Amino acid sequence: MPTPSKKRRWPLVLGAVVAVLVAALVAGSLVLDGVLTRKAQAAAAELSQKLGRPVEISKVSTRILTGLGARVEGVRIGPGPGEDAPLLELPSASVRIAALRALFSFGKDVEVRSIEVEGLRANVVRLPDGTTNVERLQAKLAEEQPKAEQPEAQQPPADRSWLRVGHAAVKDARVALLDHATPGAKELAVEHLDVTVDGLRAGQPLEVVVRAAVLASQQNLELRLGAAPLPPSLVPTPEHVVLKVQPIDLAPLGPFTPRSVGLRGGRFQADLDAALGAAVPGGKGPLQVKGTLRGTGLRFAAQEGGKALDVALDADLDGDADKGDLRIGTLRLDAGPASLRGQGKVSGLKTPSPRVEGLEIVAHDLDLSKLAALYPPIRKLGEELVGPIGLTVKGSGGQADQAVQLLVDLTPVRMRLPDQLEKAAGARATLQATLRGGEQGQSNAFRFEVASDLAGVDLRPGQALDKRPGDRLTLAAAGTVRSAGSARDVDLTRLEVGIEGDAITGSGKVAMQGQGKGAQTRFDLQARSQQLDLDRILYAGPKREQPPSKPLDPATFAGLSGKATVDVAALRFKKMDFRDAVVQLTMQGDEVTLDQARLVAFGGKISAAGTRVALAHPAQPFHLAADLSGLELGQAIRLFADHPVATGKLQGKLALDGGGRTGKEIAKSLAGALAGNLQGGVLQSKDLVGGVVGPLAKALPAGLAAKVPQGGATPLGKDLPFSLHFDRGTAKLDKPLAVKLPQGDLDVTGAFGLDGNLDMPATIQLAPATVASLTGGKVTPAAPLPVTFRLAGPAWSPSLADLQLRPAVEAIAKQAGSALVGRVLGRAPGLGGAKSVDEAKQKASQQAQQQADEARKKLEDQAKSRLQGLFGK
């Protein structure tokens, strides 16, 4: 047979290779399907344990030849305990992705071409106890969710720009509403539910469309949501909303709404088109709202008077925040007895020459207590604010100086916010704000003035300020706001706070950039006051027990930075006067550093520059640094205690680290040191010498001790160096305090608690002259006599514990007996019958020794007897 030519063999070989590759791909796909199915079923079994209800997946299949894709079939989330209907059933869902792009980018560029979910069926079941299966699932998920730890620092939004989804859709889904708590209730449903999402990718606008048939056979609800071009985080910013709802009877849906709402019935319809633009954070472009919303005959649980609530909105308005333009063709908002009406136009508010034409927005009968009677979910708010709130926006000014003015009048309102404030109806409380165009040459800017009078407000319930009804409290501010894109700069030219006879004035600048989690705010503020009487301003009444406060969230301070300066010429606090208080601080996030902190106080000066504290991280140590110069110790102690303890001029340096949220936690965590010296110090609360000598005199034999005068204080010397360190709420002396006193040298060691309690062992070396004075000259020892004791109890009323007098008493008694020898020799007249002077001296010595031994024994017996009487030993 003839051999086929090479040209004829080549297609055959290629076909064979292709066939082999196809077979390999098919075989590989089958193997991959089995692996993925087993993995999915294992994950479903694990999820079943977490959710407390069965989770099933029948099959996972892949598609390779026509583009990488996957199909999941037979997904089912079954009923939980006590339930008889599955939560969710999904016949199939498919995903197609651009395989080569994902492969060659190693997963850094994933394009999902389509996601399709078909035939989804869900059941929302209201159980006999009034809860729903969805609420039970949410509670179970909350139990399984690990408690999030507070982040150390605010992280920037995650970059998800690698993910792109061209099209996602849920087709013809059905949500059944099953009321098992109401006998005979019929099954309700939201049917023909279609959801489409197009353009989910960074840098592109997003569009979401939802259509459904709510309690109807045909679709009667349509929601369109348009978002601005997505950021890398893919978090959308809604810019355009279209809501069209044909009249829907809400009564059947009432049992499935949250119990806190208590919906019982009514009807709802809507035809609204709203382009939100720059009115939402991160949005751009003009605002346009046109259409209607209607809620009629709305009934709620606990509704008073049997009257239903009607709510209606008719709007035809547009505005441009960037230009400062607003046109109100129609604005009618009615909610029960309350209403809001608006009309008019303002243009060029951010230019030097704004124009206001008939602008007026007025609220009528805005009484939250009356509205709460019809809408019980706001009943708490209605109990806190009773009476009509005055709200008016009007154009004002002449041709050359037109402005927009906001007036809020709370004077008719009775306010009672628990643990915050109270105000009687008729007591004055007003706010006025005025907006004007920017200065000549400025664009995208407007000027503002704000003034508030809160004389009628009682702030004592907040237990921070002692502001009573009728006391002066005014707030005023003025400045300019400039904007460019997402950036806004506020130039605060005037800030005034007046409370009673004191006033605080200030100024500053605030620069804001960006929106959302990536927003940055930087400030530079100054505040000053000629005098502040904190004794008059701060609340000093009885304090209620406060529950433990939650630590601040670091996210609150994310993106916040700046500087602030506070300058107070005269300050009064706890009946003490301070002056020239200056604080300059730098803030980065929640960390505050004092660049300057000085104060003339207690007859000297205090500087705390270098102090640092993290406001939202109480567990992290703060650092306190202070230089103390020439402080009168007695005045400084008055800041913490009402009793006299010690006086003298204090020089020193303090460095402390600690952490915690409560005073006890902070005290126990303190670590650091205080070193310096005390000049001319006096311990006012105790005469330590008298506290030793008095009991010693009582312990001596009768007739041996003279009357000892006692004072009420102890001099601490001309210059007393000291050094101590703090550990777990206690201050411990690094070395003994050595005090030179005329009565004897005093050494004190040990520690004292930050609560003022002392535990300080001490020794006093009683000088010979002190002992001589104590014994009326009968005993003058050759060396000082030591007496040990322990200084204990509160610093303002300490006691001398463990007083060790026995060694001193015995030493004095012995020396008193020996002294009799000299007195006997001095009294011997002539030779006394002796043959010689030497013999006479010998006899006198023997006689004196005998008398001295007898006297010494008698004195020792008396001393022992007195000691036993004093100390029971």
Image (spheres, rainbow, N blue to C red):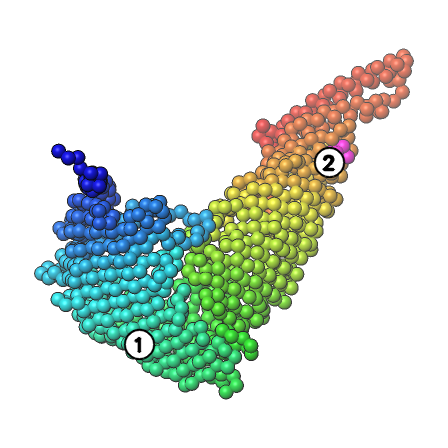
- Residue at 25% over, 64% down: 209
From the viewer's perspective, is residue 304 above or below residue 583? below
- Choose between 286 and 571: the one closer to the eye: 286
Question: Which residue is found at the position 20% from the left and 55% from the top?
Answer: 117
Q: CA distance from mark 2 to mark 1?
A: 95 Å
Q: Is residue 26 left or right of residue 792?
A: left
Q: Secondary structure at mark 2?
A: strand
Left or right: 619 as drawn, with respect to 711: left
Q: Which residues are magenta?
A: 766-772
Mark 2 near mark 1, Cβ–Cβ under 8 Å?
no
Instruction: Give the residue number, with chain letter if any, for mark 1.
Output: 290
Q: Residue at x 29, y 57 (%)?
A: 166
Quarter occupied by the C terminus: top right
State the SS at label 1.
strand
Task: From the viewer's side, name the closer residue of 515 and 747.
Answer: 515
In the rendering, at what x and y percent does residue 770 appear? 75, 35
Pinpoint residue 644: horizontal percent, then vertical percent.
Answer: 63, 50
Residue 709 quadrant: top right
Q: Position of residue 289 (x, y in %)?
A: 33, 75
Amino acid tagged 1: Lys
Question: 514 and 828: which one is in front?
Answer: 514
Mark 2 and mark 1 lie on one chain; the one further toward the N terminus is 1
Numbered mark located on residue 752 in the image: none
- Residue where numbered disc 2 is placed: 744
Among all residues in the image, which is located at the extreme front? 2
**Magenta span includes 855:** no
Name the residue rendered at 79%, 22% in the picture.
821
